[in-house]
Image: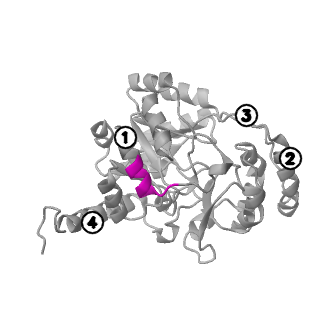
Amino acid sequence: MSSALTDLFPHPIVQAPMAGGVSVPQLAAAVSEAGGLGFLAAGYKTADGMYQEIKQLRGLTNRPFGVNVFMPQPEHSESGAVEVYAHQLAGEAAWYEAELGDPDSGRDDGYDAKLAVLLDNPVPVVSFHFGVPSREVLDTFRRAGTLTLVTATTAEEARAVERAGADAVIAQGVEAGGHQGTHRDLPENDRAGIGLLSLIAQIREAVRIPIVAAGGIMRGGQIAAVLAAGASAAQLGTAFLATPESGAHALHKQALTNPLFGRTELTRAFSGRPARGLVNRFLREHGPYAPAAYPEVHHLTSPLRKAAAKAGDAQGMALWAGQGHRMARELPAGRLVEVLAEELAAAGTALSGLPGAGGDPR
């Protein structure tokens, strides 16, 4: 299976699917054309919107690519907590002259409709976030000729991924930017994230399926490290965020290396689910009070985030970023893949020369 996946792309580099308009067809095409695996993000899009982007991407490249789908979320019983949070955000709404969104705008993100499109028009790879699809779903994709990947943040979750029949597991370390792909959103686990190298080792001993490593990877040397630890490929998101092909807002790209935003935190402030972003005013003021209620909080804050972006106010935006954000490079996406591959090759050469590595020990 490792061969089935990695044979799709010459370099062991996967561009992470970043929802919210970042992973546009131009970005995915550039990565795939350069020998990586480009990804579209279906999250927060309609099934038709996803289909139109797939058509656009196929017009830009005939290389393999992937599409990421969010799993439907269980019902929450804490509607009162969402109402309290909405009351707290009233000042933000007044400041940006925007209405708060409807927290009951939907929980399944059009899951069934998106699966139908992806099965009627098969793509090379489909990945899933926020849970594990049923074995029936994964078997259906296999019959359609589509490889499937599912995110896991613990060895236990990776076992569930393997039992369900996925072709590979995405090991997402706590360093990763954006939403943690935990299968169950338990507030008591908010500070229990596992670092990527430790997670790879634990998952490697727990399952036999290939591992794609994700979390804070910004350089080819880090790719070499996760491959040495047992991964078959590395998934990078923040590294591609600053590229000209990325659909990220200009303020978001600039913030990655702006000294004003010196660190990241996991927060529920913007969506109600733990997600790593640059620390700004909104995160500081509202993060401690945001309830565990996804996607209700996401729908609630969506108009605020859009209004902040329109106003040019990065302090009110969700600036998703991994822990390596200060290492972002404003290179074209295809060139970034080439540079990462060159760095990976150099790291491999350096490792082969170490004593006991089979190279010249001098």
CB contact under 8 Å: marks 2 and 3: no
CB contact under 8 Å: marks 4 and 3: no
Structural distance between the alpha carbons of marks 2 and 4 = 52 Å
- Residue at image point 59% right, 35% down: 71
Up the image or down, 221 lies above or below 46; here it is below
Q: Amino acid at mark 4?
A: Ala
Q: What percent of the width, then of the height, locates residue 155?
A: 46, 44
Q: Is residue 347 visible?
A: yes
In the image as oriented, which residue stretches furthest toward the bottom? 259
Structural distance between the alpha carbons of marks 2 and 1 = 44 Å
Q: Earlier in the sequence, mark 2 or mark 4?
A: 2
Structural distance between the alpha carbons of marks 4 and 1 = 26 Å
- Of residues 75 and 343, which is closer to you in this image? 75
The residue identified by callout 2 is 83
Q: Quadrant of residue 248?
A: bottom right
The residue identified by callout 3 is 75
Numbered disc in front, either 4 or 1: 4
Q: Is residue 325 left or right of residue 291?
A: left
Name the magenta segment's main secondary structure: helix
Q: Tell me the magenta residue range.
A: 194-202
The residue identified by callout 4 is 347
